[in-house]
């Protein structure tokens, strides 16, 4: 029975990886895989010899002696537990996405364009690299890439130049998202799962992530593509909303407030995100001409609803991404519930060399985590990190979790399809897979390895 579950998961995983070849949105195999796995587990619950308690991170004692009704009750409790943990991540992401869309409603991100006041290709590279690194740590790497590539399209006219800039933006955005608890979905998963804390995450990963961004940008700045000046033309374009800068700084501050709220109250992060969303939405309603209540959906207010910034933002949320996360996280949870991931982790600990074990106390090889980063360039990093949550039982803020956050967050830069930031840049600029592989992948690989080496070296200091 376990073999059948693994085969179904592998087939679903393959369909997700080949999304662009199959031309089937990855949310479809993710949701189907999740439902089929849990259905098979429900039908064959009496055929399993072990069950994994995610709360205690140990196998359930006396599972083989349980009757059918008790096993079904345990399955339902486990399903509810994982749904609750997954929902924490999804509600958090919904809040963050809504705040970002509210900022965009007021054209707040256009404020960033005023930071670019040079025509030097090299200087523009450094400006966008640092903007991507900082912005992705606040609003996540995917959104930062969308914002910066959109601004890039208004500043750099030659498509050949924009391709190079977009490639370096992807590297910088993924590096910036790795050191922040709200900068990347996988890092957010580790943070919400109480595997890392904000202060330790930043102290462990800020320098490696910065190196991961600086070295590729430094090397690229001496390449022919970034020599000379750009042809810059002023555009009439969309006028900056008078409340745009205010909403930009308010929205970013509200998102940054979430880790502070969690530290003070010890409540789950989604609670703080909902408070931040409420504050930003209040100012958005005040600043807009609409006096519409977001809780009103009757016909008398239908016209006003279309002019509400909050209603508009909610209508632009990427629900396919939310559903994909739901499917893949619950699918991985199914394998975790049977103890399969736990057993695989034990095998890894025995089968791989334990680099750094004696000094940092981790039981997992650095090589394993680096390979996880390389794998994230080929397959989605969300299920990889979700699997690691079920595989390893190391304590909170163990260096293992921070290294996983770094590797999964930055390793995807080595292929254009290896990260959400890369995929969206690929779509916006029609970047060819093999062009990126030839021109940008080696820069990303150098940055990834350099950051990993810095992490391993600085780990001895903590």
Image (cartoon, rainbow, N blue to C red):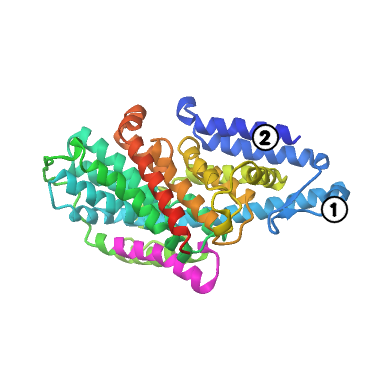
Q: Nearer the viewer, residue 28 or 423?
A: 423
Report the residue at 21% width, 38% height from top.
223
Tell me where residue 137 appears, x and y as whole percent.
Answer: 38, 56
Q: Which residue is mark 2?
A: 6
Q: Secondary structure at mark 2?
A: helix
Q: Give the main secondary structure, helix, strand or loop, of the magenta stretch.
A: helix
Q: Which residue is mark 1?
A: 62
Would residue 89 be found to the left or right of residue 239 on screen? right
Q: Which residues are magenta?
A: 247-270
Q: Nearer the viewer, residue 409 or 86?
A: 409
Would residue 1 be found to the left or right of residue 122 on screen? right
Tell me where residue 221 appears, x and y as whole percent.
Answer: 21, 43
Q: Secondary structure at mark 1?
A: loop
Tell me where residue 101 appears, x and y as whole percent.
Answer: 37, 53
Would residue 91 be found to the left or right of residue 421 on screen? right
Above or below residue 207? Residue 373 is above
Report the residue at 52% width, 59% height from top.
191
Would residue 1 be found to the left or right of residue 197 on screen? right
Is residue 264 covered in magenta? Answer: yes
Residue 20 visible to an observer of this rendering = yes
Residue 136 visible to an observer of this rendering = no
Tell me where residue 171 appears, x and y as whole percent.
Answer: 35, 44
Among all residues in the image, which is located at the extreme top?
Answer: 21
């Amino acid at each position: 029975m376990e073999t059948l579950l693994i085969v179904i998961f592998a087939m679903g995983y393959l369909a997700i990886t080949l999304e662009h070849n199959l031309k089937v949105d990855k949310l479809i195999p993710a949701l189907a895989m999740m439902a089929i796995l849990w259905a098979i587990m429900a039908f064959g619950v009496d055929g399993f010899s072990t069950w994994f308690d995610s709360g205690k991170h140990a196998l359930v004692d006396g599972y083989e002696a349980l009757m059918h009704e008790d096993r079904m009750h345990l399955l339902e409790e486990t399903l509810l537990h994982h749904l609750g943990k997954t929902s924490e991540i999804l509600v958090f992401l919904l809040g963050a996405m809504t705040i970002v869309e509210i900022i965009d409603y007021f054209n707040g991100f256009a404020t960033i364009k005023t930071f670019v006041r040079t025509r030097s290709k090299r200087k523009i590279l450094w400006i966008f690299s640092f903007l991507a690194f900082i912005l992705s740590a606040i609003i996540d790497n995917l959104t930062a890439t969308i914002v910066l590539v959109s601004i890039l399209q208004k500043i750099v006219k030659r498509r050949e130049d924009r391709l190079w800039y977009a490639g370096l933006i992807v590297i910088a955005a993924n590096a910036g998202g790795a050191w922040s608890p709200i900068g990347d979905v996988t890092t957010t998963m580790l943070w919400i799962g109480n595997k890392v804390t904000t202060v330790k995450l930043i102290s462990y990963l800020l320098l490696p992530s910065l190196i991961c961004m600086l070295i590729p940008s430094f090397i690229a700045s001496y390449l022919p593509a970034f020599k000379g000046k750009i042809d810059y033309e002023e555009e009439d374009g969309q006028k900056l909303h008078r409340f745009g800068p205010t909403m930009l700084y308010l929205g970013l501050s509200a998102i940054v407030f979430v880790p502070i709220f969690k530290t003070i109250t010890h409540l789950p992060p989604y609670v703080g995100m909902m408070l931040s969303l409420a504050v930003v939405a209040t100012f958005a309603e005040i600043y807009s001409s609409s006096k519409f209540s977001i809780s009103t959906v009757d016909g008398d207010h239908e016209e006003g609803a279309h002019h509400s910034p909050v209603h508009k933002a909610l209508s632009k949320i990427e629900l396919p991404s939310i559903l994909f996360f739901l499917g893949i996280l619950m699918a991985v949870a199914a394998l975790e519930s049977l103890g399969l991931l736990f057993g695989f982790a034990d095998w890894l600990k025995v089968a791989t060399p334990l680099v750094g074990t004696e000094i940092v106390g981790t039981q997992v090889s650095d090589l394993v985590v680096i390979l996880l980063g390389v794998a994230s360039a080929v397959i989605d990093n969300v299920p990889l990190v979700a699997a690691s949550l079920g595989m390893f039982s190391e304590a909170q803020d163990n260096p293992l979790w921070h290294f996983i956050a770094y590797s999964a967050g930055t390793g995807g830069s080595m292929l254009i399809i290896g990260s959400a930031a890369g995929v969206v840049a690929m779509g916006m600029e029609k970047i060819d897979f093999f062009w990126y592989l030839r021109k940008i992948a080696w820069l990303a690989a150098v940055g990834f390895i350099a950051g990993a080496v810095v992490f391993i070296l600085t780990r001895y200091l903590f």
